[in-house]
Amino acid sequence: MKANFDTVQTQERANGPPEGIKIKPHWPGAEKRERKNRCDLQRERSHAQERKTERERKTECERERGWAGQAWDREKQRKREGERGREGKTQIWDLTKEGSTRGRTMKARAGLVSALVLFLLMGEVSTQRARGKKPTKRPPTTKKPSVAKPGAPAQPEPKEPTEFPPVILGPPSAFPDCPRECTCYPSYPNALNCENRNIRVIPTIPFRTHYLYLQNNYITEVTEGAFVNATEVRWINLANNRIHQINKQVFEKIPALLYLYAQENRLKEIPSGLPASLEQLRLSKNRISKIPAGAFSKMGNLTLLDLYYNQLADSDLGANTFKDLKSLVQLNLARNILRKMPPALPSGLIQLFLDRNSIDDIPKQVYGASSRMSAGLDYFKDMYHLSFVRLNRNQLSDKGLPKGVFNISTLLDLQLSHNQINSIPMISSHLEHLHLNHNQIESINGTQICPVTLEDELADESLVPRLRYLRLDGNHLSPPIPMSVIMCFRHLRSIVL
C-alpha cells in the first residue's frame, strides 16, 4: 500500500491534481497578503461610503440653505411692502383682503384723517394750557463789519486771558517745610524744584534752599518778601514767566546769590539792588530799554551779562555803564537797536556778541571814555584778552572799518557775515576762524591781506599765519583761490567759496 500511495503522489506531481479539485498555493506569506488585501478592500469601501454620505449631507445643507434664503427674500419683500403701506398707501393692505372695494378704502382713509386732525387739536390745546402764551421771537440782528475811519488810531491788541490753569501740586515729600506746589528730592536736600507748576505767586522758600527753580510758570511780580527765608540761596531760575517788576529790596535778603536767570519775561529795565556777589545775570528776551545809573556799580564779580533780544539803544549805554564790571568775560548785546559800538567796554572781556544790530561804524577813537584814556586809541586796543567777536548782520562797510581795527593778537574768531564789506580786512596772524560770507567782496589779493611777508615766514616758522577756516560764500567770487592766498595761509584747512 505504501508503494501505491507514493506512486499516486508521484503521478499528481507530474500530471497535476485530479479534475474538480483546487489546491491553494502554499508559498510563504500568501495567507498574510491575502488578509491584507481583504482589509484594504474593506477600508476602501468604507471610505467610499463615507464620501458618498458627506456629499449627500452637503447637498442637503445647500438645499436647506437655498430654501432659507428664498424664505428670507420673501420676508424682506413683505417688510418693504408693509413700510410702503404705512407711508400712506393703504390700498395695498385693503386689496390683500378678500372682498375689498374702493368705497371701503375711501372710508378708511377719511376715518384716519379725521382721527389725526382731532389728535393734533387736542395736543395743541393741552400745550397752550401748560405753557401759556408763547413769546414772540425777534428777528436776529446782523452786525455790520466795522470799518476803520481814516486817520483813526489802530485798535489795541486783544488782552490775554485772565484765567490761568490750576496749580499743579507736587508729590508728597519727606520734608515738612516743602511747599505743596514744589518737589523736594531727598537726594538733593538743598534744591527746590517748582518749575512747570502754573504758579502765580512765589511760595514760601525753605531756609535750607540753595538752588531754586521757578521757570515756566505764571509769576508776574517778585515782591519784597519773596525770598525772606531763603537767605542762603545761590541759584535762582525765573525764566519764562510774566515778571514785569522785581522789587529792589528783594536782593537785600539774599546776599550770597551767584546766578540769576530771568530771561523770557516782561522786564522793562535792569533790576536795581543786585547783590555784589552775583556772577551770572541772564536777562535775554525781555523788553529792557533802560539801564538805571549805577545798576552795575557794585557788581565787580559779574562774569557773564546776557542782554540779548531787548530794546536797548545807543542812548541807554552811557560811558560808565560797564565801567565797574572788572571781571566781565562775556557780554551779549545781540539783537537790540544799537547803531554804534558800546563805549568803554571792560578790558578783561573775552567774548563780545553784537549780532543783528544796525552798527555801521567802528570808531578809531573811544568816545565817551574816562579821562584816563587818551584819544586816538583803537577801539579794541585795551582789550588784552578779547578772543571772540561777532558782528554778523549789521551794516558795516569798508568805510566804517578803520585799517587794522581787527589786528588784535589775542583774537581767534572773527565773524562779519551779512554786512556790506567789499574787501577782506587786515587780520592778525593769530586769527584761526574768519567769517566773511554774504558780503560784497569781488576779489582777493593774498599780498594785501597777508599779515606777514613771505620772507618773514621762511625765516621764522612761528610767524606763519594760523588761519584754519575761511568762509567767503555769498560774495562775488569764483574759483580758483589765488596762489598768493594759499602761500600765505599755509595752515588753512577749509575754504568755503
Image: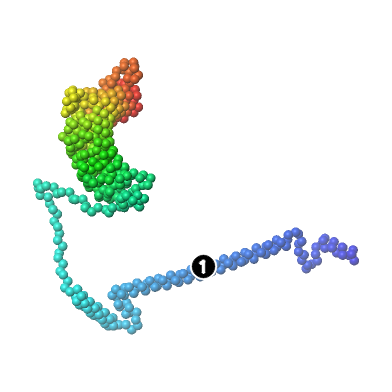
* Residue 170 as seen in the image, left or right of residue 33: left
Q: Position of residue 368 (x, y in %)?
A: 16, 28
Q: Residue at x 60, y 65 (%)?
A: 47
Q: Mark 1 points at which residue?
A: 58
Q: Which residue is drawn at 26% across and 31% down?
A: 327
Given the image, on which type of amino acid does mark 1 rest?
Lys
Vertical position of residue 309 compared to residue 496: above or below: below
* Front in this rendered view, residue 141 or 17: 141
- In the rendered image, the quadrant that contains the N terminus is bottom right
Q: Position of residue 39 (x, y in %)?
A: 66, 64
Residue 358 in sight here = no
Image quadrant assignment for residue 496: top left
Residue 468 in sight here = yes
Q: Where is residue 244 in the image (x, y as percent from the top left)?
A: 20, 45
* Front in this rendered view, residue 144 or 434: 434
- In the rendered image, the quadrant that contains the C terminus is top left
